Structures are given as C-alpha cells and as structure tokens.
Image: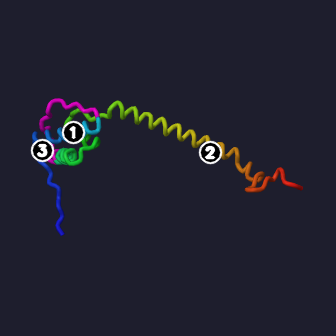
Amino acid sequence: MSTQYNQLLEVSNVNIAVAMQEINAMAKRRNLLFVVGLQPAIPQFPSQAAMKKFRRRMNRAIATPTMRTANVFLRALGHSTVEYSKKELAIRAARAKYVQVRKEARKAHEEYLAQKGDFYGGRVKVGVDVLHRAA
C-alpha cells in the first residue's frame, strides 16, 4: 500500500500570484469583498521555520481557497483581507436578531408552562366532561 503525499509548492512570485488568483476566484464566486492591489513580492523570512509556515499557508490557499485560508495567507503577506459582502453581513445580522428573539420566545414559553402547571389536567379528561356529568 503506497501513500501519496502532497507536494508543497516552493515560495516564488509565480506561486504567490497563483494563490492570489485562486483567492480572487473564490471571492468572486462567493460574492465577497476583495480588492486585488499590487502584486506582493516574496516576503523576507527571518528563519527557515517562518518560510515553511508561509509555504504551508500559501499551499492551503491554493488547494482549498476558503475565507479562513485566504485571510491567513493574506495576513502573512501583509495584504488586506477578504471581507463579507454587505448582503451577507445583513443576513448574518438578521440571523443574530432571529436567534435572540427565538431565545426570548422559548423563555416566555417556559414561564407560561410553569404558570399553567397542571391546571387543566384534572378538570377535563378525554371523552368525559367532569363539570357537567350527571350526579
């Protein structure tokens, strides 16, 4: 049984450009706000470990361009990040409001159940009217 390992791309201007293109395509596909500015150059790495971290971030941004992987890579470049669109921010705000109202409704329902208790349980039984039966 052989195991395949993903080959990491080397840090180069070409691979950074590929990552930026993938991020831009993902942003357009999901209607996110991302402005492609100047093409960033290869950053200076203080150590080999820092270069390896950057390389892994670049490869993740190319392989699976999500908002998280894109922003991690862009922050490492010192570039602006991908932001949600106005429409998506409005949807998220409406969802948060809905969740808050739903919690309040559940709390009110629990208070109602505590107040009601078993008030109606002993008075009306299925098929028999306790108040109006013949004595």
Q: Which residues are magenta?
A: 32-51
Name the residue at 73% across, 52% down.
121
Q: Is residue 36 left or right of residue 100?
A: left
Q: Is residue 87 left or right of residue 134?
A: left
Going from N to C along the chain, the mark reached first, 2 or 1, is 1
Q: Position of residue 21 (x, y in %)?
A: 17, 39
36 falls in the magenta region: yes
Q: Quarter of the image for the C terminus: give it.
A: bottom right
Q: Which residue is mark 3?
A: 11
User: How many other residues sit within 10 Å of disc 3, few (<14), some (14-19) or many (≥20)?
Assistant: some
User: How many marks do you count on the picture?
Assistant: 3
Mark in the foreground, 2 or 1: 1
Label 1 and label 3: CA atoms lie apart by 21 Å
Secondary structure character of the magenta stretch overall: loop
In which quadrant of the rendered view does residue 45 lie?
top left
Q: Which residue is mark 1?
A: 25
Q: Which residue is mark 2?
A: 110
Q: Position of residue 96 (x, y in %)?
A: 45, 37
Q: Secondary structure at mark 1?
A: helix
The amino acid on which the numbered mark 1 sits, given as a three-letter code, is: Ala
Going from N to C along the chain, the mark reached first, 1 or 3, is 3
Name the residue at 78% across, 51% down.
123
Disc 2 + disc 3, Cβ < 8 Å? no
In which quadrant of the rendered view does residue 82 lie?
top left
Label 2 and label 1: CA atoms lie apart by 48 Å
